[in-house]
Image (spheres, helix red, strand yellow):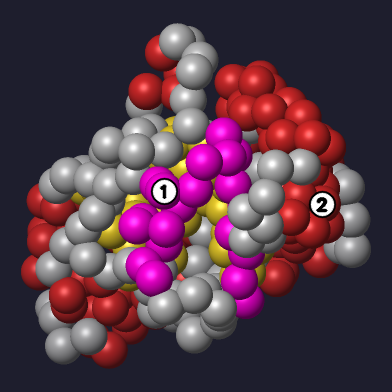
Amino acid sequence: MYSERPNVLVDRIEKEAYVWYEADWVHDTEEHSHQRGQLVYVEKGFQYLHILDRVYLLPQNHAAWIPPHLPHRTTAASPHIHLRTVFYHLTESDSFYQELRIFSVPPVLKEMILYASKWSTRTEYIIEEATFLKAILLELPHFFKHALALNIPVPQQEQLIAVCNYIMEHFDSDSTILDIAEKHNLSLRSLERLFKNETGITVSKYLQLVRIIKGVEFLSSGNYNVSEVAYKVGYKSIQAFSASFYALLQKRPNEFLG
């Protein structure tokens, strides 16, 4: 659409808020920052967000609020990524907007972001757009407060990132951690030690987090019941799924049914 890099383009546009949506988005893999705050919503696929010395998983139906001037870059293993991004010139002094936020997107915010895509890459001032996007910005602290904020740390070693990619693509399989280790030419002990050292959590915990995040996504879609979702994300029983779900979120799966 534009040959100019997004981080250059969006900072010279005069509008207070600017929408950018593209299917199969190719984001800047080089570290960069914006003068604007940035709301990134992952509609399809998943990507990794690299900030300072941490890597975060940004799965489907999740968003990241990236404050102004925060250096970041992204990488992705998912072949098709649909991102919807809104860039904001900030006038709000609320400390909420000065920190990185990663959270699951509730249905109301999702619909607002999807609707805002009608103004994608429009550079002229449109009062309806400005009002609508301002409402999203002002409501972000409320949406974040009531959303799931499961920040999943990701390792930085390429071999371990490959493990994470495999889990994201095969979370519904019955592969054991030993199977995953062997597939990536690691012993079980080495995989667990390296993964824990880099992320602070075990591979089993990472798999559990990914499964529960996907479970929330499926439950919220309204297309599946709890039993169907349990099996779709790799659990052998509803009881095991519910117990794991509650242990992480302190909520029952049926509370998320769309």
**In this picture, residue 74 sits left or right of residue 103:** left
Residue drawn at 14 percent across, 81 percent down? 186
Is 26 inside the magenta-drawn segment?
no
In the image, residue 37 lies at what x, y percent? 44, 36
Residue drawn at 45 percent across, 52 percent down? 10
**In this view, the mark in front (1 or 2):** 1
In the image, residue 222 lies at what x, y percent? 89, 56
**In this picture, residue 218 sits left or right of residue 78:** right
Kind of residue at badge 2: Tyr
Circle 1: element type: helix
* Disc number for residue 162: none
Q: Are marks 1 and 2 in contact (CB under 8 Å)?
A: no
In the image, residue 45 lies at what x, y percent? 56, 71
In the image, the segment drawn in magenta is 4-23
Say which of 151 and 236 sits in front: 151
Image quadrant where one finds the N terminus:
bottom right
Residue highlighted by disc 1: 12
Say which of 82 and 106 sits in front: 82
Location of residue 192 with respect to 101 vertically, above or below: below
Circle 2: element type: helix
**In this picture, residue 183 sits left or right of residue 2:** left
Residue drawn at 37 percent across, 23 percent down? 98
The reply to whether residue 227 is visible in this rendering is: no
Residue highlighted by disc 2: 115
